[in-house]
Amino acid sequence: MTAMPFALLVPGPTASGKSALALMLAARFGGVVINADSMQVYRELRVITARPTVEEEAMQPHRLYGVRPSAEAASVAWWREAALAEMAAARAAGKLPILCGGTGLYFRALTQGLVEIPPIPEEARAEARGLLAELGPERLHARLAEVDPESAAKLRPSDSQRLARAWEVWRGTGKGMAAWNASGEGTGPAPWHFRALHLDPPRDQLREAIRRRWAAMLAAGAVEEVRALLELGLDPALPAMRAHGVPEIGAYLAGRITLERAGEKACLAIGQYTKRQATWFRHQPLVDPTRLHTIHARIAGEAQFSESERERIFAFVCEGVDGR
């Protein structure tokens, strides 16, 4: 019987240092870093999403970063198919696939499978977008609770993207998202052996890292990047238009708030998001506990590790490489 191929997962909240860790591991094990972040797939959003820099991408192979135009929403199903193709290509080249990101649904689509929902008619999509624009997310959540209470109960009233998706699925298929997820219809887990290095740093470390990252983004041209994005005239309901920092800098460019206030609002929103990410990864295990190693510190680069810590991480990955 042929052993399943091995891939390494590096999940964790925004600003926890996943990219630095993945880059170090790619250098050590001859790996390919594959993006598992739903915002870093968009071409126009390098700075505001803190994608790896051009210099970092040149150090080791990086895949699925900046590969989609912001005008096209990227789905979990699209990402899963693209990620599996990149994983297979890495394996064929004798390299270790290292999936790095903060989008839990992406990781879960690999390790647990993905429910396959039939194509949604454009009329249902248009209705969902129209209701979101007319009512706003909280009132749309209340409307969804009337027709699909099970799905509404699983969504935050402020989560406009998933609320619109839940509405279009209910309208387009006659069955709610929660019912589809419980149906068991779809793909199974990817035929790979996974291990996960989960970053779960303290909240104070993340808050400080978010503030430093915001300052670095501004210095690297975040305002100019958002201005260029807004000039495309895209549908405000698109995921890229709601990337952290885009609405806040957009408000600054429109003269509604100061740049300082935009930074305060963005850092607060990112901090709240990292809290939800951390909770999700703690309570939605992607792999068996015996194949999980949690790092309770923010990673800033290889120099941060003591020799013993680095060796523990390397030994954990080696066990997967060796098929254990």
Image: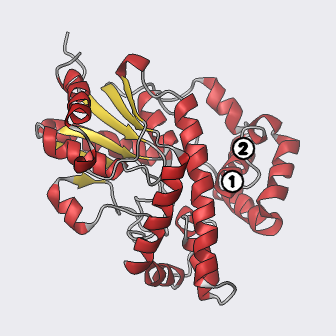
Name the residue at the bottom extreme. Answer: 255
Which secondary structure lies at badge 1? loop
Classify 10 Å Cα crowding around label 2: few (below 14), some (14-19), many (20 and above): some
Q: How is the image coloured?
A: secondary structure
Residue drawn where x is 17% and y is 36% of the image: 91
Question: Which residue sits furthest top?
Answer: 1
Identify the disc placed on residue 195: none
Amino acid residing under circle 1 = Asp
Give the quadrant of residue 47. bottom left
Instruction: Give the quadrant of the C terminus.
Output: top left
- The amino acid type of the residue labelled 2 equals Leu
* Residue 57 location, quadrant: bottom left
The answer to whether any part of residue 213 appears in the image is: yes
Q: Are marks 2 and 1 in contact (CB under 8 Å)?
A: yes
Asked which quadrant contains residue 117, the reply is top right
Q: Between residues 112 and 293, which one lies in front from this camera angle?
A: 293
**Percent position of residue 288, x then y:** 42, 19
Q: Percent position (x, y) of residue 52?
A: 31, 61
Q: Residue 159: which disc?
A: 1
Q: Position of 51 compared to 122: left or right?
A: left
Name the residue: 57% across, 73% down: 263
Instruction: State the residue at coordinates (58%, 83%).
Output: 259
Is residue 235 something that shows in the picture? Answer: no
Q: Nearer the viewer, residue 228 or 29?
A: 29
Label 2, on which residue?
A: 155
Check disc 2 and report its element: helix, strand or loop: loop
